[in-house]
Image (spheres, grey):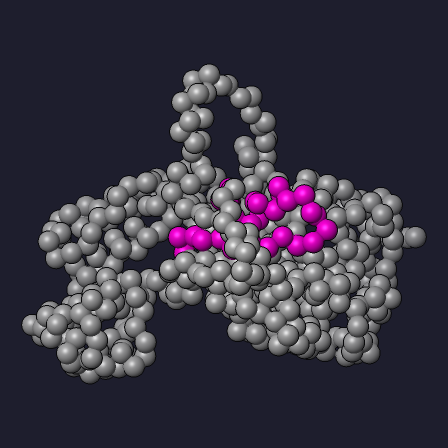
Amino acid sequence: MTNVGWNTGETPTPREGGAGAKGELDIISLGRRVRHLRKGLGLTLDDLGELVGAAPSQLSLIENGKREPKLGLLQGLAGALGVGLEQLLGAEPPSRRAALEIELERAQRGHLYQSLGLPTVRVSSRLSTEVLESLVGLQHELERRLDEQSATPEEARRANTELRMEMRERNNYYPEIERQAQELLAKVGHNHGPLSHHVAADVAEHLGFDLHYVGDLPHSTRSVTDLKNRRIYLTQGQRSDHDPRSVLLQALGHYVLGHQTPRSYADFLRQRVYTNYFAASLLMPERATVDFLKEAKTAKELAIEDIRDAFSVSYETAAHRFTNLATEHLGITTHFQKVHESGIIHKAYENDGVNFPADHTGAIEGQAVCRFWTSRAVFDVPDKFRAFNQYTDTAAGTYWCTARTERHSSGEYSLSIGVPYEHVKWFRGRETTERSLSRCPDPGCCRRPPAELSAQWSGHAWPSTRANSHLLAAMPQGAFPGVDETEVYRFLAAHEGR
């Protein structure tokens, strides 16, 4: 790990190009539209710059889709080009060539093209329309062939990517679920403090469910709800990875949110995310949590471990809940990672522009994260009692992250929350002198062995890989993937008369 230390105790300076850029695809379309209108009027960049009071170099960046203009400049451009603001921001490309240019720009900035390691083609007026047609056609054919090869796990990754995009668009905040949780808490008289097991049981009772703790719960389940007899079956002491309160509240969430049998894996995944959100909204009520966060922000002492301790939840639940509320109520963009000790991303979320590794579908889960990111560096830190904090200079800008590790039955995981440099002033741990440099997705960053090691061992090593059989298998079938319905029905039949 590459670290740079300071002795001043001051917050390190950021690297150029911090996160926060919005809708890159819209910026590309806007730039091509501005160029088309400018050339149609016979204006040079210098001419247009004089009309709107902007430097030609700034306008060039806008036309090439590399900078988003502010509203004032947009209005000035619309006026100078003789169009309304709506027309300037319209969805349709102004010409067939412009459409090809936009599509090629989008493709080259996408995960698939970047994964090929090919040089970027400069899109300019010198590039013939025929070449544009060929390059765009090749992109379409490559995507088509990859889609043909996609197995069911690919479909699952696509569904996960679509859901993550929805979460990002909403800043991972769902006010309708927050309201339902708040109304339910009010009905059981809970208005302050951590949600106890007793109050969680009160919630179930209010909704008309009896709780039954059993020792023979089907192995593929965390809980089973008997809607016919209004029972929820749970187990104690055998699944230590999960908070019993969360398991119960998630089961209740399906009922409160009106979920029906999933029709697809995407439907199943969305329901799971919503019920997890519902459970967190009960464990950490919005009003109380926001008040706690605002007080900590005012004191510049935001810390995930304090949220964890205040509401008696796991570090992972506290980190997830922070992503729900940070942008909506604190104006802080952020990202979250859960990374296995092998370096593979298990869960991830971002709305701050961090450059997560992704495959050609945009899927993040299952990808190896950079060795120099905080979520990997934390595994090598001997002090596991306190959070580990680090600045990381990346291709997308400088980020500050705080991370901890937790051990589960499937191994050790790191849980990290990160923010762009501009937001670090609100967090405890901002004074850290730990800093690293990540050049990913450049393969030379950490995916290729150092040259001296390659020279010494290339051709002289033959590792015996640990084959993960689940990588070769299709996604489990059924409305509830991985659940043996026969086992569940037999379980319910056996317990119905008890």
Nearer to the camera, 385 or 154: 385
Q: Give the number of marks.
A: 0
Relative horizontal placement of residue 23, taking residue 78 as reference (left or right) = right
Q: Position of residue 248 (x, y in %)?
A: 78, 59
Q: Is residue 450 above or below residue 3?
A: above
Residue 251 seen in the current view: no
Residue occupying image coordinates x 52% and y 51%: 5
Residue 148 inside the magenta-drawn segment: no
Residue lying farthest to the front in this orientation: 7
Q: Position of residue 209 (x, y in %)?
A: 83, 65
Relative horizontal placement of residue 27, taking residue 196 as reference (left or right) = left
Residue lying farthest to the left in this orientation: 42
Q: Is residue 295 above or below residue 198?
A: below
Relative horizontal placement of residue 419, taking residue 46 as reference (left or right) = right
Relative horizontal placement of residue 188, taking residue 456 as reference (left or right) = right
Nearer to the camera, 231 or 413: 413
Residue 117 seen in the current view: yes
Nearer to the camera, 267 or 187: 187
Which portion, as a residue range, is magenta?
A: 367-396
Q: Position of residue 52 (x, y in %)?
A: 19, 80
Q: Is residue 441 above or below residue 30?
A: above
Nearer to the camera, 170 or 320: 320
Residue occupying image coordinates x 21% and y 69%: 59
Q: Position of residue 326 (x, y in %)?
A: 58, 69
Residue occupying image coordinates x 70% and y 65%: 307
Residue 374 inside the magenta-drawn segment: yes
Residue occupying image coordinates x 13% and y 52%: 127
Residue lying farthest to the right in this orientation: 498
> Dividing the picture into quarters, in which one does residue 470 lie?
top right
